[in-house]
Image (cartoon, rainbow, N blue to C red):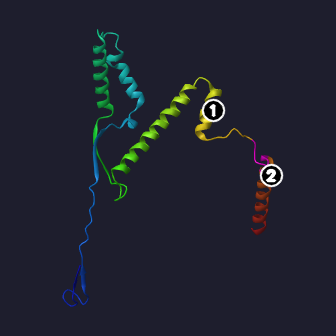
């Protein structure tokens, strides 16, 4: 740190210092994405139906031929309806003290969230044709309890509605008097 005497630059002293600070560069990820959410589903469906995939005239001989046809047609349609865009995603570390262990933990949390989504999707899809059994995992997911009774201090719905009806009538009467 240096302190310059007054009256050199201004009538005050100039204090300057050097503080060693290391700032990590931003994390930059380049990706190729398609805007699938903007695709008109009816138009895309019509294009698939008009393609060679649904043509009775096209005869593939082997499984590889079918795969090649499927891949080429859907790639062509994807390029037409949702062209590839190159985007750059910039992400700053959460904090200066974050290290690789913290990044690893963050990655683990992403894995856990994905596993949770897969688990609940499987539970719900497994019961899709059985509505009564479907409610069990849905209630667990929503954290709904089996207890459907109201607490003892809770007013019945009619008393609650009557209370607000009377209150509203009083408000209306008071405004009519004031006016």
Mark number displayed over residue 136: 1
Range of the magenta residues? 149-157
Residue visible at 61% across and 37% down in the picture: 140
**Residue at numbered disc 2:** 162
Q: Name the spot of residue 4 as percent of width and height, x first.
A: 21, 85
Q: Name the spot of residue 175 as percent of width and height, x first.
A: 75, 65
Q: Is residue 37 above or below residue 66?
A: below
Q: Is residue 134 above or below residue 145?
A: above
Q: Are marks 2 and 1 in contact (CB under 8 Å)?
A: no
Circle 1: element type: helix
The overriding secondary structure of the stretch rendered in magenta is: loop
Mark number displayed over residue 15: none
Q: CA distance from mark 2 to mark 1?
A: 35 Å
User: Residue 68 falls in which quadrant of the image?
Assistant: top left
Q: Name the spot of residue 43 as percent of width and height, x first.
A: 39, 28
Residue visible at 29% across and 27% down in the picture: 75
Q: Is residue 151 magenta?
A: yes
């Amino acid at each position: 740190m240096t302190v310059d005497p007054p009256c050199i630059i201004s009538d005050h002293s100039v204090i300057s210092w050097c503080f060693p600070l290391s700032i990590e560069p931003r994390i930059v990820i380049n990706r190729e994405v398609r805007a699938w959410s903007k695709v008109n589903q009816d138009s895309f469906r019509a294009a698939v139906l008009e393609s060679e995939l649904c043509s009775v005239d096209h005869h593939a001989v082997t499984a590889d031929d079918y795969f090649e046809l499927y891949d080429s047609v859907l790639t062509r349609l994807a390029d037409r309806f949702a062209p590839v865009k190159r985007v750059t995603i910039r992400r700053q570390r959460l904090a200066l003290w974050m290290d690789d262990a913290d990044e690893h933990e963050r990655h683990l949390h992403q894995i856990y969230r994905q596993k949770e989504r897969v688990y609940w999707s499987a539970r719900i899809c497994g019961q899709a044709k059985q509505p009564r059994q479907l409610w069990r995992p849905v209630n667990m997911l929503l954290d709904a309890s089996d207890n459907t009774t109201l607490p003892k201090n809770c007013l019945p719905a009619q008393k609650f509605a009557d209370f607000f009806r009377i209150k509203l009538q009083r408000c209306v009467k008071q405004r009519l008097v004031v006016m």
